[in-house]
């Protein structure tokens, strides 16, 4: 879910494909637990190494400025448990990451078992919305609880490849 535009001269973006996912993933970034993200390689990279962009919430409001630290193009099945944990999602396990990303890529119509992804490592440069940032820790707790309710209990990542 990308919202083209600029803020303070920088490109803007939203995570995911729904308002709920945009807020959830932005919260994980500002909380410091999401330092990685991936997209289908068929779309091309959304950023360049060293590029700074503004992360928006679901309302299109800026929450933080991020910098792309690294970009890797690799097969979906080559994403490691360590990379999956960098995404900060669910219980941080590879299983959660894999299931969530297959669902997402199916929704956007790009899923193929042999697909390539672009894995981006990022860092927060500055917070813009301090109120959003204050609520982010609660969002992390909710993220972990939701994963546990769905049966994911690895907390910290395991190599449970299916």
Image (tube, helix red, strand yellow):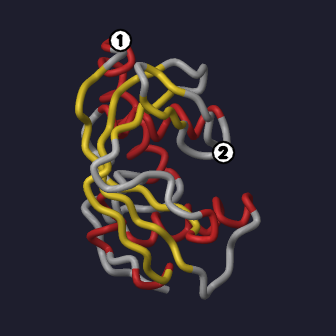
Residue 24 point in image, percent of width and height: 49, 36
Element class at badge 1: helix
**Nearest to the observer: residue 66 or residue 108:** 66
Residue 62 point in image, percent of width and height: 45, 21
Distance from disc 1 to disc 2, alpha carbons, whole Å, reads: 23 Å
| Residue located at (26% from left, 70% from top) | 82
Q: Which residue is under mark 1?
A: 131
| Residue located at (27% from left, 45% from top) | 33
Q: Is residue 12 above or below residue 68?
A: above
| Residue located at (47% from left, 61% from top) | 38
In the rendered structure, are the residues bearing label 1 and label 2 in contact, judged by CB atoms less than 8 Å apart?
Answer: no
Q: Which residue is under mark 2?
A: 17
Residue 6 point in image, percent of width and height: 51, 26
Q: Quadrant of the N terminus?
A: top right
Name the N-terminal-most of marks 1 and 2.
2
Element class at badge 2: loop
Q: Is residue 34 above or below residue 116?
A: above
Within-10-Å neighbours for mark 1: few <14, some 14–19, many 20+: few
Q: Residue furthest top?
A: 131
81 sits left or right of 60 in the view:
left
127 sits left or right of 7 in the view:
left
**Nearest to the observer: residue 142 or residue 54:** 54
Residue 108 point in image, percent of width and height: 73, 59
**Nearest to the observer: residue 79 or residue 10:** 10
Within-10-Å neighbours for mark 2: few <14, some 14–19, many 20+: few
């Amino acid at each position: 879910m990308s919202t083209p535009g600029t803020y303070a001269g920088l490109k803007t973006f939203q995570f995911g494909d729904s308002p709920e996912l945009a807020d959830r993933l932005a919260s994980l970034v500002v909380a410091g637990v999401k330092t990685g993200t991936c997209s289908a390689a068929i779309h091309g990279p959304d950023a360049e190494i060293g590029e700074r962009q503004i992360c928006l919430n679901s309302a299109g409001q800026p929450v933080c400025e991020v910098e792309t630290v690294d970009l890797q193009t690799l097969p979906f099945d080559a994403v490691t448990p360590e990379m999956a944990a960098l995404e900060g999602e669910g219980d941080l396990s590879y299983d959660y990451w894999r299931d969530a990303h297959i669902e997402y890529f199916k929704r956007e119509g790009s899923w193929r078992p042999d697909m390539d992804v672009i894995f981006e490592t990022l860092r927060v440069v500055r917070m813009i919305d301090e109120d959003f940032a204050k609520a982010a820790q609660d969002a992390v707790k909710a993220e972990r609880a939701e994963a546990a309710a769905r049966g994911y209990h690895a907390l910290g990542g395991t190599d449970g490849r299916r």
